Image (cartoon, rainbow, N blue to C red):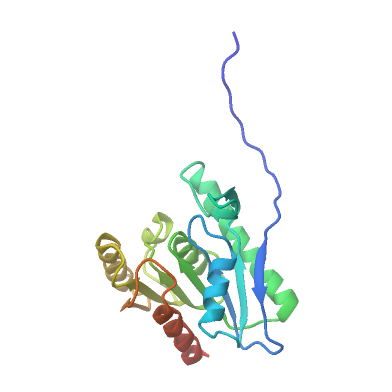
Amino acid sequence: MRQRQSFSFELGIRAHVEAWAPPEPAYCLIAYHGYAEAALAPLAALRRAGLDDGVLLAPLAPHHFYNRRGEVVGSWMTSFERDQRVEELLDHGRALWQEVLRLWGELPLFLFGFSQGGANAYRIALLAGLPVRRCFVLGADQPPEVSQLQAAVGGPALTLMTGREDAASLAQTMENDHRSLAERRYNVERLSIQGGHEYSPEALELLHRRIRDDL
């Protein structure tokens, strides 16, 4: 009688990225969308907020599916083979930075992540070894691989943002994350902004101001 078996093997994949770039960009901002969103969601929000002086990149999460409207959307992570997925996402972030270097040269690098994409922004900023100046996280908590890190040695500044109309439980989680990161000597700030679980205009305007200040 046959027994059920399973195995895994390596498979190369293509990575899709939505992009916008001015003729002489001052920086690069990589934006990671939320669960069940398309890559265009954060890119469109950033453009509406007036970000027009840097390269804006929005990669599509590698796990694709259709939403109820038939649009192709993505997810960054599931619990299945999670450690392997984390390594693949770190490789994704490193490979995207190499494409930036090839296409635009070395630019000041910033990261932005919303909701599930915020967890990915955390891990790329703190685990991928890239020259990130600041990582913006909107409406998201730390993934386990970040919350388990010890005291910071260098690393990027972190700006954590929560909408005042977002879930109270998430606001408390982000407050706890802020405290935990500060205790581990990360350069971190925590901001409460207008809006719910969304690409709040106030959050994106603040993001743009922080980028200008950091340049």
Left/right placement of residue 13 relative to residue 76 reads right
Q: Residue furthest right?
A: 102
Depicted 139 relative to depicted 71: above or below: below
Who's the residue at 54% across and 49% down the image? 85
Who's the residue at 71% across and 81% down the image? 105
Q: Answer yes or no: is residue 155 visible.
A: no
Q: Which picture quadrant has residue 130?
A: bottom right
Count of numbered badges drawn on the protein: 0
Q: Residue at x 55, y 65 (%)?
A: 128
Query: Looking at this rendering, what residue extends furthest in the front direction?
Result: 69
Q: Nearer the viewer, residue 166 or 25?
A: 166
> For residue 177, which quarter of the picture?
bottom left
Q: Is residue 171 left or right of residue 2?
A: left
Residue 58's spot in the image, x, y percent? Answer: 60, 68
Which corner quadrant holds the N terminus? top right
Residue drawn at point x = 56 percent, y = 52 percent:
69
**In the depicted structure, whether residue 65 falls above or below residue 2:** below
The x, y position of residue 126, in whole percent, is 47, 67
Residue 191 coordinates in the image, percent (x, y): 32, 78
Q: Is residue 86 visible?
A: yes
Q: Which quadrant of the figure has residue 100? A: bottom right
Of residue 21 and residue 158, the one placed in the foreground of this image is 21
Residue situated in front as seen by the camera: 138 or 165: 165
